[in-house]
Amino acid sequence: MVQYFKNQPEGYLMTSIEGTVLEIVFRNDENGWTVINIDFAGELTAAVGCMPHIHEGEFVRLFGAWTEHRLYGRQFAVTSVETRLPGTAESIRLFLSSGLIKGVGEALAGRIVDTFGTDTFDIIENHPELLAGVKGISHRLAMSIYESFSQHIGVKQTIIDLQSLGLSVRQAFRALERYGAAAPTLIRENPYRMIDDITGIGFERADRIAAHIGVDRQSDYRIDMGIKHVLVTAMNDGHTCLPRGELLRRAAATLGVDEALVDARLSALTLADQLAQKFINRTPAVFHMAAYVTESDVARRLYLLSRCAPRVPIKDPVRAYERYIGDTPLSEEQERAVLQALSAQVAVITGGPGTGKTTIIKAIISIFEQSGVTTALCAPTGRAAKRIEQSTGREASTIHRLLEYGMPMDEDFAENEARFIRNEDNPLEAEAVIVDEASMVDIFLMRALLRALSDGTRLIIVGDADQLPSVGPGNVLRDIINSGIFPVSRLTKFYRQKEGGTIVENAHRVNRGENPEFYLTGDFVFIPENRPEAVIERLKELLTKGELPEKYDILEQVQILCPMKKGVLGVHNLNMELRELLNPRLVSKPEVQVGDTLFRVGDKVMQTKNNYGLEWYYTDETRYYHKGLGVFNGDMGRITRIDHDAKEATVCFDGSRDAVYAFAELEQLEHAYAVTVHKSQGSEFPVVIMPLMSGGGRFLSRNLLYTALTRAVEKVIFIGQKSAAEAMVANNRIMGRYTTLDHELKELAEILGAV
């Protein structure tokens, strides 16, 4: 029995049917989802479910339940399958002509069956040379038929073996692709190898498989993998290290073993240079080696860069500023920030919305231009780069594009492996680099940028340190500021975004610990509701009736931001509710099921992980064709095409860049009708709507509310309980990150001398 589904749908009356597979109507090769027609008791019957290796002509027994589809009528929903090779001459002919056996079409299948009848499979498997006696079959083709048939039987058995280890159908396919026929053996030898090799296999799944095959829970290898898993999980949560005691507790709880065993293996891993340890303020911290090397390198490069002489000095910054300023003087605070940036090798400018950061950037660029200093302007995301480009009137790019992420041309580099082409061996030509929205830059991206800067290149870091930190590991902007060794311009004075506007004022109120001023109309609106279900209904009403749909493109200009992922008002549930409202199912809209997620043409989606190798392209207004590599965590777009024949989908990002995904790659996407506040960083939207209910605890914090407010340009709408917003303002607990960049910088300054 081939058990494809282990969990039975709740409420189904389980039964079974059997018959010959007459037709494969549809199959998703990525996840095994299949629609078939079978001959059940003389009637043509549709069956649907995960049946990756069912073929025409096979006799099957299907276990499941009868269902009624609103479009396709009565179907049999399959939970598990038993298969056997066809037994009648007609079913054998159908099986051979299904396309499964290479080189055998309908006519040739008929001649084979006419010759050997119901002994056909025995002949193919045990006496393939006899096939050469059939008209149209050479000895070479006979051997090819034998190999195709054997491969089919072998693949099916391998999938069965892999599923018996606890892998899903999709994971079994990936394991087979990665390891070949030896997959079951290799996984039994070391199930943890799948963590690095197979997408979707984490430590928990590998550990369950390990337990299933009898791996000792206290084995050194298991504990080693558990420790590394905890550190990787911590990195995914934004940390670059963990205090040793915290790591011991987390790893022991994850593994279900005593801390003493973890402690012993932790010491062994450190001695073997597989992990790093360092005392930070007399507390031992443990690092994944990738994070340790990266954070240390960022500190070293930043510090050394700050000590260099400028490539193009500005002899008199004050005079240069005076030449620029003319009849449009800046405020005293802005003036200090400009002069500081002109005088320092590494400078930081931080402030909230409306404090003039963009004005300062424009001034700095203009003075650099007048002084002959070539300048590159960049930001972490495409949206942020586009926004600063529009605000300054100067060309801006993503950091990835600035560093020319792509395929190198040299023969020594591994085939099809992408990288940052700009590095210490091929640095940027720019003599000054300005990074906007620096709070979003994680430690790995900062290292890549620093590697591409020549000695003496000016670096100006601009951002809002009060916003949430980067999605990736590190707390780069805050750590650089806290190190105290670089000049920092703190902007506190703000300017109204427009007459009568309240978004900026309220953002600053929140940041000061004051409750925002709510209104019934205008650009800062509060709509009271006390039940989550009522919040959803009011949200749907806002998106389909009245001012918003009349004035704005709902999918492009209105964004729902949620504090949480789970719950009735979390992004998961809201996305399901809103996609059926805003992009309902139509026969004209192709769909594809990937795992538990259904994607549809027109869906608003977000990339959830960095995919450095995914190619994108667009044609500009001059009809010039552009292409590049890389779609990154947080990028938002719309699905514009789903092609089942090519097994690929196209997503348009930022209204211009088209990226083509193989169906298997679509698991990197999630719906984005609603997104978390964390994932919205670096983006601005004309309208932000935020559902708020009490009960989020420590996760509903002041800087979360502040970050949400600063994403809105024209309008903010809260729906829910005012007390929830007030509780967020009162909760000034910042979800801390274990990082050491500030410590590393201070240590370097003490050793080498302060700047």
Image (cartoon, rainbow, N blue to C red):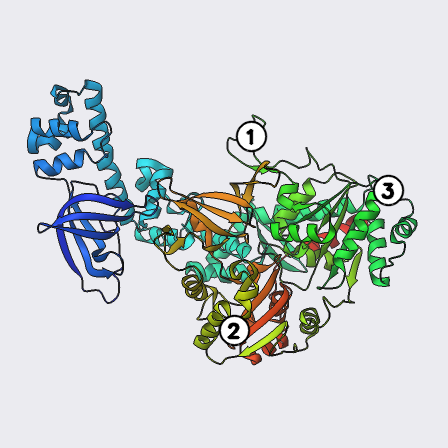
| Circle nearer the N terminus (1, 3) | 3
What percent of the width, then of the height, locates residue 586?
36, 56
Q: Which mark is residue 696?
A: 2
| Circle nearer the N terminus (2, 3) | 3
Work out whether residue 155 or residue 297 is closer to the camera in this orientation and state it.
155
Left/right of residue 328 with respect to residue 92 in the rendered view: right
Left/right of residue 236 with respect to residue 219 in the rendered view: right
| Circle nearer the N terminus (1, 2) | 1
- Binning the other alpha carbons within 10 Å of mark 2 as few (below 14), some (14 to 19) or many (20 upward) gives some
What percent of the width, then of the height, locates residue 256?
41, 61
Residue under the point 13% across and 32% down: 121
- Residue annotated with mark 1: 413
Say if 176 sits above or below 269 in the image.
above
Residue under the point 40% across and 55% down: 204
Q: Which mark is residue 646?
A: none
Helix, strand or loop status at disc 3: loop
- Residue annotated with mark 3: 313
- Binning the other alpha carbons within 10 Å of mark 3 as few (below 14), some (14 to 19) or many (20 upward) gives some
Amino acid carrying mark 3 in the image: Pro
The answer to whether residue 604 of the structure is visible from this angle is yes
Amino acid carrying mark 2 in the image: Gly
C-alpha gap between disc 1 and disc 3: 37 Å
What percent of the width, then of the height, locates residue 697?
53, 74
Work out whether residue 525 or residue 704 is closer to the camera in this orientation and state it.
525
C-alpha gap between disc 1 and disc 2: 49 Å
